[in-house]
Image: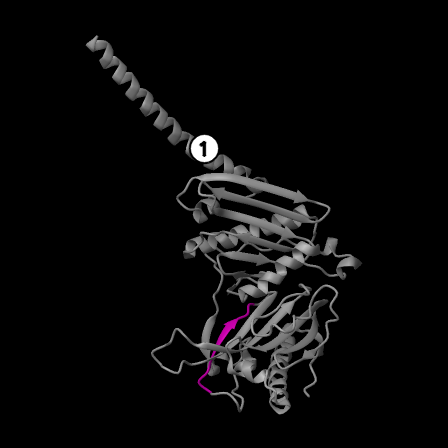
């Protein structure tokens, strides 16, 4: 009897060990299977391994509406956290709605290297807007860009950000092929390339850069104010921000933006509002008139670059004291603010048009 119980205990232990070993073997196999199945099997395994968490992979979903030009896929871990999510929008309401959220992110959080037509917003979300010539008929204005977002929620380190960027470019090229866009595929980033958060420079250092328009202090500005440069060659949107130094020099982390200069290439959405200029949407939807505009809170200039509409904006930042003056009851004060914004956007647009060999520049009339 004792011998029988001994063998029973041994057998039970063996079964437990085999069960553990079996589970341990199945878990990596499930991870591998989900990685190869997700997003139509187009996700590069190595980059997925870099951006994922330590949690096991849990599920994947995919949908495609060819008629609407809408694609979506997501790979999640066992905790339901997104590992990689890809969404593509050819046109329509979904595309316009997605674009309307971009302004909420105060884009770009980072610009992309290598002339890639896109940018990163917060939380490791990359937007790319490749040209889609084969689908750009009269209904889409004769010139159109696909919108593709790639989200790698857990990408934080430089290595993870580099993998994030490769994933975004790889999946964007897959989407242009899937949606029959035609055109050349986007170039893969160089090894180790990551998005650039932009740099903070003095006015003197900004001279000759893409933010040259802010390099010269105007009579109402202080020469020690700083500039953030977040514009990349080939990008579809960029931003120059003018900052005033903190009142207390020890409070370096709390500098307030004063003025924002932005550039937008191509047709976006008709309901995009910049923080600080919420009373007027940026006039650049698919059916927008694309003409200059000027109010106390927003100045807008337009041009044409490579056959595409390009818009240039200037507005007061949300906490800027100039924004408060723009809502003054005194017409003299409001007129002064319009002239200031007109001066900003005119200098910015002229410089950008020169750099991009653009034509048909139209500036707002200061009044």
Q: Is residue 248 magenta?
A: no
Please tell me in which quadrant of the rendered image residue 332 appears.
bottom right
Front in this rendered view, residue 25 or 318 = 318
Q: Is residue 224 magenta?
A: yes
The percent position of residue 177, horizontal first and vertical second, equals: 66, 47
The percent position of residue 219, horizontal first and vertical second, equals: 53, 91
Please tell me in which quadrant of the rendered image residue 240 appears.
bottom right
The percent position of residue 84, horizontal first and vertical second, equals: 51, 47
Is residue 21 shown to the viewer in this render?
Answer: yes
Q: Residues within 10 Å of mark 1 (few under 14, many from 20)?
A: few
In the current view of this chain or complex, which residue is farthest to the top? 1
Q: Residue at x 59, y 57 (%)?
A: 128
In the current view of this chain or complex, which residue is farthest to the front? 329
Give the color scheme: rainbow, by chain, secondary structure or one colour: one colour
Quarter of the C terminus within the rendering: bottom right
The local secondary structure at tag 1 comes to helix
Residue identified by numbered label 1: 29
In the current view of this chain or complex, which residue is farthest to the right? 138
Q: Residue at x 65, y 70 (%)?
A: 281
Q: Residue at x 67, y 63 (%)?
A: 269
The percent position of residue 249, horizontal first and vertical second, equals: 35, 81
Is residue 146 shown to the viewer in this render?
Answer: no
Figure check: 134 above or below 25: below
Front in this rendered view, residue 258 or 139 = 258
Figure check: 286 above or below 48: below
Q: Which residues are magenta?
A: 223-232
Figure check: 109 above or below 296: above
Quarter of the N terminus within the rendering: top left
């Amino acid at each position: 009897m004792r011998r029988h119980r001994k063998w029973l205990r041994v057998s039970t232990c063996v079964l437990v060990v085999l069960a553990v070993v079996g589970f341990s073997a199945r878990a990596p196999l499930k991870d591998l299977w989900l990685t190869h199945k997700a997003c139509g099997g187009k996700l590069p395994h190595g980059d997925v391994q870099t951006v994922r968490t330590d949690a096991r992979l849990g599920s994947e979903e995919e949908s495609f509406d060819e008629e609407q030009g809408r694609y979506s896929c997501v790979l999640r871990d066992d905790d339901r956290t997104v590992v990689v999510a890809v969404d593509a929008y050819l046109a329509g309401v979904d595309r316009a709605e997605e674009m309307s959220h971009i302004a909420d992110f105060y884009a770009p959080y980072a610009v992309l290297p290598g002339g890639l037509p896109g940018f990163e917003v917060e939380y490791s979300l990359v937007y790319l807007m490749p040209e889609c010539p084969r689908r750009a008929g009269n209904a889409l204005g004769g010139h159109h860009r696909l919108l593709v977002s790639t989200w790698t929620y857990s990408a934080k380190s430089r290595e993870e950000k580099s993998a994030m960027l490769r994933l975004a470019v790889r999946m964007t090229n897959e989407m242009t092929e899937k949606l029959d866009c035609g055109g050349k595929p986007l170039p893969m980033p160089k090894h180790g390339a990551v998005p650039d958060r932009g740099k903070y420079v003095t006015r003197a250092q900004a001279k000759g850069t893409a933010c040259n328009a802010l390099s010269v202090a105007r009579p109402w500005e202080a020469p020690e104010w700083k500039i953030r440069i977040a514009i990349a060659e080939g990008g579809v949107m960029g931003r120059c921000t003018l900052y005033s130094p903190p009142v207390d020099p020890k409070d370096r982390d709390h500098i307030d933006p004063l003025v924002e200069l932005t550039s937008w290439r191509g047709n976006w959405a008709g309901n995009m509002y910049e923080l600080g200029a919420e009373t007027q949407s940026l006039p650049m939807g698919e059916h927008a008139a694309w003409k200059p505009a000027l109010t106390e809170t927003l100045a807008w200039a337009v041009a044409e670059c490579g056959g595409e509409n390009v818009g240039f904006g200037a507005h007061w930042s949300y906490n800027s004291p100039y924004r408060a003056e723009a809502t003054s009851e005194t017409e003299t004060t409001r007129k002064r603010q319009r002239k200031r914004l007109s001066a900003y956007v005119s200098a910015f647009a002229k410089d950008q048009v020169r750099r991009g060999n653009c034509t048909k520049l139209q500036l707002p009339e200061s009044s």
